[in-house]
Each structure stands twice: as C-alpha cells, then as structure tokens.
Amino acid sequence: MFSTKKWTVIYVILMIGLVVSMLGLTILYTNLNRKHVILQGEFEKVSSHVDSLRETVDLIKLGSNNSKLPYGLTSQQIYDLVEPSIVKITVKVKRNYGLVPYAQGSGFIFSEDGFIVTNHHVVMGADWIEVTFLEGTINTAEFVGADPYSDLAVIKVNPEIQDLQQLFVGNSSLLEVGDPVFAIGNPFGLSGSMSEGIVSQLDRTLSTQYGYLIVGVIQTDAAINPGNSGGPLLNKWGEVVGVNSAIASKSGDFSGVGFAIPSNLMARVALSLIKQGNYTHPWLGLAGVDVTPAIAEAMDLNLSRGFLLTYVAPNSPVEKAGIKVGTKTVIIDGQRINIGGDIIIGIDDLQVRKLEDLLVFIEYNRSPNDSVILKIIRENEVMIVEVELEERPPPR
C-alpha cells in the first residue's frame, strides 16, 4: 500500500510533467502559428503576383482590340512578360582545331514545343547552334529550316529541358506610322537589351546581302544593332509584330533606321518551315521600273503611275500569259530604259502605283498556283490578263 506521502510525490511529479508538456505544446503551437502566418503572407504575395500575371496575359491576348487597356502595357510589363522567351543564339563552325564561334544573334520562342524563330543570316552555314536563355541556361539547337527570300529561319531546342513560354504573335497589318514598338535582343552580345521607338514607316522594300528583295518591311527608329537580328519587334501589348532583321548604316551601327520582317509574313513562313522545312513564294517572273512623269511623256501616256515591264523571265508565268516588254531604248534621267512594253496598273482589285504594291499584294495574299488578274496598259489601251502564279525558283 502506498502511503499518503508517496501519493503526494507521484502527484507532484505528474503535475510537473503536465506543466512541462503544456509548456512544450505552447511553444510548439507558437512556432507553428508563426510559420503559418509567414507562409500565409508568402502565399498571398504569390497569389497576388499570379493573379497580376494572369490579368496581364489576358489583356495581351486581347491584343489591339482590348478596350480595358487602350494605351497598352508599360515598358517594364512588356519586358517582364517576354524576357523568358528571348534567347541569344551562338553559331559555331567546324575548323581543323574544333568548333569556333563565328556569329551571334537573337531569337524568340515561337511555340512551347521548342521551335525558335530567328533570321536566316544568323544561322546560315552553322555546324553547331547554341541557345542561351536570359536566365543563363544554355541548350543546343537543331536546324529546322530557313527561307533566304524572307531572311527567316526556325531552329528547335528540346522542350523537356525546361518550361518554354511562347510569345503571342500580333497582326502586323494593324500597325500604323507612329505606333510605339519595342525591340528586344542581344546587341553586341549584351543579353536582354530593350530599346523603344515608333513605327517610322510601313511597306518598305529591303534588299538583303544576298540580293533578294523583302517587301512590306517595317521601318522603325527603335535602336537595332548587330546582335539584335532575329529578335522580336513588339507592339504596346507585348505581341510580336516583326522580326528585327537589318539596319541602314554606313558604319554598321544603328543610325536611326532599322527594319523588321512583318509578323504576318513571319507566321506563314515559320509554320511552313516547321511543317515541311521550306516555304514557297509566289512568282510572276518580271522586272521593270516605276512609271515616272518622264517615262509617261516618252511613252505619250496620260498617267504617270504603274509599273513598266522591261524584262520577262523565260517560261515565267507572265511570259505564258502573253505579257510584253518594250524594244525601244531611250535615256531617261541618265539611265537606259526599254520603253513601249506593258504597264501594270492593277492586280485583282488593287491599284498598282509602283512595283512594291504588286509584290506586297502577291507575297502577303497569294500562293503558288493561285490566279491573279492583271490590269495593264498596252499601246494606250487598257487590257485584262489572267496569270497563274508559280513557285519562285530557288536561290542561285
């Protein structure tokens, strides 16, 4: 039998144990509660950030039809949105002593399955292509296809290496002179550089280093320098409206005039390169000069617009359609010009004032095997000629 004294000792020990346990539980609860408060605060911050990003992405999806954000995103919002999608491209060639870097450019994620758009002249002749994301990850890329006539190319990285965020492609035909635009790329190897400007002019014709003409080109005063090639030109909603391609400069550095391939052409070319490795351009097979007042006077014309044909390629669509060139050579403004040939003044429902009108129309609206109606002037009489477009021959 336990004595009263022993029971008292046991009771005291139990009470001390209970107090210690309660104190321990109190401390544990306090620590857990503190951590819960901290985690709750972090969760609310992350949720707020996610909601903000979702709202911004939703606004961008609306594009230029978005009435809630008529003035677009801020420069910082645009940069934050597109930064994960911009890459630096390093091209290497094989030498006797191994792979050697010989060119750098920019590119952007076109689709989440790894396809990246850049310029043809950036990756031309590459034996090895490396892609560096702005956060530092470096991946190798495979060549998918290229189109020298539009100076566009597609390469591909393994989409399983990391999450890829594609850029939204906007409608370049909605651009107007004076619209704000942003160029992001890697000028002079400086990763993630952003410049801001406006659309200086539209429907420019760009002569590439290979001698090909790219029509419908965007001119911008946003700073574009060597290394920017292949990077995106963005509108005020962060949509891709062009691919930065070239600058007009005697020094090789930016001097206020840059050029970008419109997104409407880029999207058509990129999808075709991804699907079949090449892109087919429609072709008429002609050359000539824009009609000037001096040419109109020499040909006794009542108008000084349109495109005078001075050359027709053998077995070309226009030759098959019976289009004729002149045989009389005269000197006009110091140049020898064959006059007397057909003058194109319209194609389908479009009035042709100059060569660019004709080329832009077929490049952006027609495909090989489509038929077009040419309105021409022959010996001062208006005629209608139907021509079936063919595929542009491959570069020589």
Image (spheres, rainbow, N blue to C red):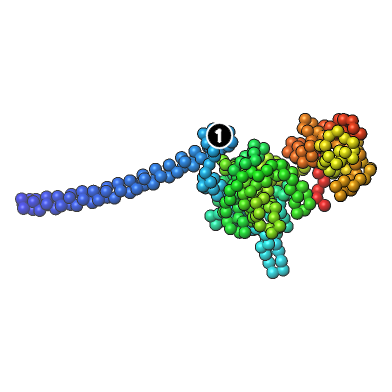
Closest to the observer, 54 or 192: 192
In the rendered image, which quarter is residue 291 located in?
Answer: top right
Closest to the observer, 352 or 347: 352
Q: Is residue 236 left or right of residue 292?
A: left
Q: Give how far across and how far down residue 319 sits, in percent.
A: 89, 39
The residue at the point 21 percent across, 50 percent down is: 23
The answer to whether residue 91 is above or below residue 144 is below
The residue at the point 11 percent across, 52 percent down is: 12
In the rendered image, which quarter is residue 124 located in?
Answer: bottom right
The residue at the point 70 percent across, 44 percent down is: 217
Closest to the observer, 343 or 367: 343
Q: Secondary structure at mark 1?
A: loop
Q: Give how far across and how far down residue 263 sits, in percent.
A: 66, 42
Q: Is residue 373 left or right of residue 235?
A: right
The residue at the point 68 percent across, 40 percent down is: 264
Q: Give how far across and how far down residue 304 sits, in percent.
A: 83, 37
Identify residue for label 1: 66
Q: How many marks?
A: 1
Q: Give how far across and how far down residue 13 sits, in percent.
A: 14, 53
